Image: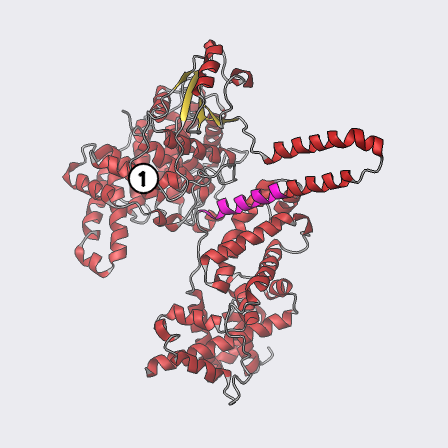
Amino acid sequence: MAKSDAQLMADFQRGNESAFAELVARHKTPLINFFYKLLWDRHLAEDCSQEVFCRVFRHRNDYVPSAGFSTYLYRIGRNLWIDRYRAQKHAPGTISMDADVDDEGHTRGEFLAARQHDPSYRSEVSDEITRLKGALDGLAPELKETLILVKYQGLKYNEAADVQGIPVGTVRSRIHAAIEQLRITLQIDVRQTEDA
Amino acid sequence: MRKLSCEEIKSLLSDKAAGCPDESLAGALELHLNDCDECRAYAAELEGLAEGLEKLESVEPSSSFDMKLYARLHGEKAVQKATAFTIIAAYLKRLRHIELGAAVYPLTLICIAYIMWSFISPRKELSVEPRFGGPHGQLLLVYEEPELNLIAIDKAISQRPDLHASVADPYKEPLPDVPLPAFEPLPITTEIAVELPPQRREPSIDDFQHFPEPPRMIVPSGGPGGTTLASSRFSTIRNSPSHLRIAISQGIQWLSRNQREDGSWQAGEAARAGYTDVEITSAATLAMMQAGFTASGRDETSLSVRKSLMWLVKQQKPDGTFAAGPRKAQAQAFASIALCEGLRLSDREILRARFRPAIQQAVTALLRMQSDTGAWGGDDPEMTALALMATGSARAAGLSIEQETYDKAIAWLDNFREEMTSPELAAVEPKAGTVMKSVTYAAIGKAALFVDRSGGESVQKSVTDLVNAPIVWESGDFFRWYGATLAAYRLSGENWQNWRTNLLVELIGKQAGMLVKGNTPEQGSWPPHGICRESGRTYTTAMAILTLTASCGHSPLYGGSK
């Protein structure tokens, strides 16, 4: 029977490095994809994932089994992303859905619609995947991060709350906001495509 | 049941789109959607959105991910050690007791310096690696430095005439004349063949105290009990280029390290794709056997083969089958081949007596899985070819199989080939057409192994097309590469060398950890990816070893003999 993540970490804390290798093998793909969806850059995603594993390796004794290992891993990953990239506003679109975008009182929906008309943005807009990526990138970082953790990494709301250090209710409302924003963005996009 | 408002419904639908549906309210949700057009439209939108979000691509780790990670970790360890000793040295400087300090301080510094040097400088340790079965008492010392001190080695050899050591010409085996991958080149190796006196099985460190320390020492499994087939297998591999031997041996080592105590290999996450422990264990066992280890050998790896075969026998159910699930036919075929070959390559009657009844039941169950069309696996050409390989093994092990079994299967494969290579299909679905064609060619090539050695014109053409197709590493088509290698060696003639060269460069170049100093847990294995992305590392490693050993030219399996 395969050992659980907690058992492997316990072995690793006792000095068994092959237990660490087993954890890497189990979690590297989802972790890389977590960063990939945040950054859309495979090399950066792998670099960040390696840094996360290095941090796990260095601070192995900080892990307590009461927290799931996945949760622990994503917490480190999220902190790394915040330190490195969120501060640089790597992910665009930090504007709240309800806020006015400019002094003339245009809303976010109108802002998004206007962006769809921008030729430099619409260069590959006929590609559905590109539209989806663009819509995802248009989310506020905290919404995007929450959606990725829940939708793609398969975390439950309470696990995502643990990773982000926020209440479960906040996770839920972020998910709802993210879904709603994506729905509107993609609706506008479809309308623009049909009108074009 | 409480009625939910539209706002609440929209929240639930968002939860569902994000992959976290609230099952306790599923009934209330459905009830509301039946009556509310607006929410129903909203649900349809979110369903489309969720489907769209599923389409965003995921990526697989690159093949160098682990290598880079462990290189980072090794670098950090060295820094940590240096830092630790620096701190100790600084502390010792503060010793106030002058007499003690005068006596102890310089001595302590010398000790610290020595410890730092011994930890931080790479230490060459003599690592002993078990190798392929074969004549006992032979071993190879492998040096990788281009500027080797041959004078020192000659002197060491002269001091131990009982070892019958000799230096191989380092440039005797040329590297393949193809562009190498754009990283560290394959090492040129110098090998010293050493034969121990007949009464000794294992080398001791005393034998080599006069030799310059080699980074690797290869110890063939040795010991009486291997069959002539296995011994000839060893000598065939041993006469192959050193980088090929090293790749095979590292792969076998990885398999050995990952074998469970009960003799099996675990499917692990590959079980999600239907792979069973039986199929994975059988593939790994076959890889070891094709490398020359047998159930009757006396070395550790041969013991692994024996344990795994015994484990397989224990997994058999009363009806002769081994596994259930979507890949039960594959598991049946692989297990049958492993047991048949285990019997054929073993000269110990007590083992053969254990295998025979299991083989009879296993092959009978496999034949029952053949459909009326003559194919196996729901009319799958690869599965049909695999089943034919199993029946070939069974026949070589002494079981009689009705000719009709082969005739039906080959007739089906021939018809399948004509249908699937139609230009009309290729025009509509070019990618699918190409994959099907290559699968079909591999199937025919494999079938040609033992049914029709000459191949006939149509099979010859198929195999020629097969070996002329490029080997695309990203396809991860490990099973096809193996089948193609078997077929190409048997039937391809001049195209064989092209296939073999391209194959060796791709497979050897992509073996985990081979171009990095130091050990990693995955060293010696091949990563699952592409078509085999769900098959697990044991399966891809076993297939790669089977492919590389088959590329040495002589396959004792499936009734083959030189």
Chain under callout 1: B
Q: Quadrant of the N terminus of chain B?
A: bottom right
Circle 1 sits on which residue? B503
Give percent across and percent down for residue A123. Answer: 35, 73
Taking the spot 26% from the left edge, 51% from the top edge, the residue there is: B436
Q: Camera-side residue: B553 or A172?
A: B553
Looking at this rendering, what residue extends furthest in the bottom direction?
A104
**Label 1: which secondary element:** helix
Q: Camera-side residue: A119 or B501?
A: A119
The region drawn magenta spans B64-79
Q: Amino acid at mark 1?
A: Leu
Give percent across and percent down for residue A113. Answer: 43, 82
When asked about the image quadrant of residue A194, the answer is: bottom left
Give percent across and percent down for residue B195. Answer: 44, 15
Looking at this rendering, what residue extends furthest in the left direction?
B457
Say whether residue B43 is visible.
no
Please tell me whether residue B397 is drawn above or below residue B530 in the rendered image. Answer: above
Q: Residues within 10 Å of mark 1 (few under 14, many from 20)?
A: many
Please tell me whether residue B535 is drawn above or below residue B126 in the rendered image. Answer: below
Magenta stretch: includes residue A187: no
Give percent across and percent down for residue B145. Answer: 44, 29
Say whether residue B380 is visible.
yes
When asked about the image quadrant of residue B136, the answer is: top left
